[in-house]
Amino acid sequence: MNEIKKEGLKRVLKRHEDNVDNIQAIVSRMTETGFTISTKELDDLAGVCALLTKQAEEMAKKDASRIKIAFKREEDYKETLERLQTCISENAHELRKALLYHTAKPLVWGIERSGFFNGREKWAKGFENQRV
C-alpha cells in the first residue's frame, strides 16, 4: 500500500468519526419521540423511511385509541401522525446531511461502519467495544 492510499483511508475514517456524534443526536431525538431505533430503522431513515412511517402510524393509532369520541379520535390520530412524520422527515434530512449524501463523496461505509447500537439503544463509536 503506498502512502497516498493510507492518507486517503485516514481521511475517510476521520470523516466517519466526525459524523458519529451527529448520528447519535439523530438517534436520541428519534428515541425521545418514542420511536424504536435499530440499525435497520436508521438505514431506513437514510432511505425511504417506510419502516419508520409504519411505526409512526402504529404509534398514532395507539395514542388515539384512548379517546372514546370517534371524530376527536380521528383528529388526534391525524395530528399525532403529522407530528411524527415531521419528526421523521426532519431527522431523515439531518441524517442524509451527516452521511454526506448531498456530496460527490458520501460516506462510503454509511451507518453500519460508523458505529453500532449497544444494548441500551445508544450509538457507540468505533468497534473496539463491540462484542461478537
Image: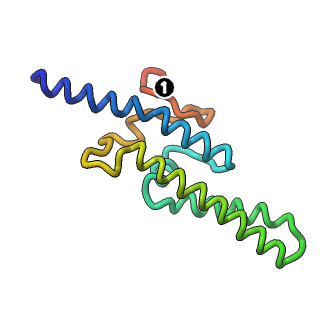
Q: Position of residue 85 (x, y in %)?
A: 60, 61
Image quarter where the N terminus lies is top left
Q: Residue at coordinates 54% horizontally, 54% vertically from top-left?
A: 90
Q: On the image, which quarter does residue 17 sit in?
A: top left
Q: Is residue 99 left or right of residue 7?
A: right
Q: Residue furthest bottom?
A: 71
Q: Residue at coordinates 78% horizontally, 68% vertically from top-left?
A: 76
Tag 1 residue = 131
Three-letter code for the amino acid on which mark 1 is drawn: Arg
Q: Position of residue 21 (x, y in %)?
A: 49, 32
Vertical relation: 20 (above or below) 43: above
**How many numbered circles does the render carry?**
1
Q: Is residue 80 left or right of residue 94?
A: right
Q: Position of residue 28 (x, y in %)?
A: 60, 39
Vertical relation: 82 (above or below) 33: below
Q: Secondary structure at mark 1?
A: loop
Q: Residue at coordinates 58% horizontally, 62% vertically from top-left?
A: 53
Q: Residue at coordinates 64% horizontally, 44% vertically from top-left?
A: 31
Vertical relation: 130 (above or below) 66: above
